Image (tube, rainbow, N blue to C red):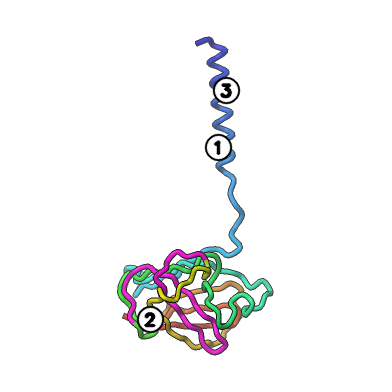
Amino acid sequence: MKKSTLLTTIAFAFIMLLSTNMEAQKFRGLDKSPMDAAIYKASRNAPVMAKVIYSRPQLKGRDLASLAPNNKVWRTGANEAPTITLYEDFKIGGKSVAAGEYSLLTIPGEKEWTIIINKDANAWGAYSYNEANDVVRVTAPVTSGDELEAFSMAFSEGQLNMGWGTTRVSVPFTK
């Protein structure tokens, strides 16, 4: 192979490598509703017993009732419906649920929310929600607290706590 052809080939390969590399480093901006996880453990070093993966929409001056309308099935966050993984059998609101992966949906209400554990995991929003696949439905009273800009979930003391705005809902999780 001639020296000039070899140099041309090497130069072309180098340019292609740089252009591919530069393209690969373009990232999307931050999600408007970032993903988060709530993890349930008996203690800091104990194995995970349950995990909820969900997206955290922000109020941004909007009314909670317009984002999570009362008496309608809500995806319980943004984007995909939250996925709840139970690594062992639980009683949720006093009703038995076997270990497994489920979606977690809610029906907000003024005085209480209905919490739904559904077989259809990894669903986008609540658009394909099928009530026939509900594993359990429980109700939990609405309380109030300090203002939360971002929808949030956290496990504490045998409860799954959800909050947004000044609305708070807690669902018992027991063995």
Give the CA separation, mark 3 to mark 1: 15 Å
Determine the residue positioned at 52% across, 63% down: 35
Q: Residues within 10 Å of mark 1 (few under 14, many from 20)?
A: few
Verify CB contact (< 8 Å) between mark 2 and mark 3: no
Q: Nearer the viewer, residue 130 or 18?
A: 130
Q: What element carries label 1?
A: helix
First in sequence: mark 2 or mark 3?
3
Q: Residues within 10 Å of mark 3 (few under 14, many from 20)?
A: few
Q: Is residue 45 visible?
A: no
Q: Given this view, does label 2 or label 1 mark the residue nearer the observer?
A: 2
Q: Quadrant of residue 3?
A: top right
Is residue 104 on the magenta stretch?
A: yes
117 w.r.t. 3: above or below: below
Query: Which residue is the extreme one toward the right?
Result: 61
Determine the residue positioned at 52% across, 77% down: 73
Measured as percent of width and height from the top left, residue 125 is found at 52, 68
- Mark 2: amino acid: Ile
The residue under label 3 is 11
Give the CA separation, mark 2 to mark 3: 64 Å
The residue under label 2 is 92
116 w.r.t. 17: above or below: below
The magenta segment is 96-124
The residue under label 1 is 21
- Mark 3: amino acid: Ala
Q: How crowded is mark 2: few (under 14 residues within 10 Å), some or many (20 or more)?
A: many
- Mark 1: amino acid: Asn
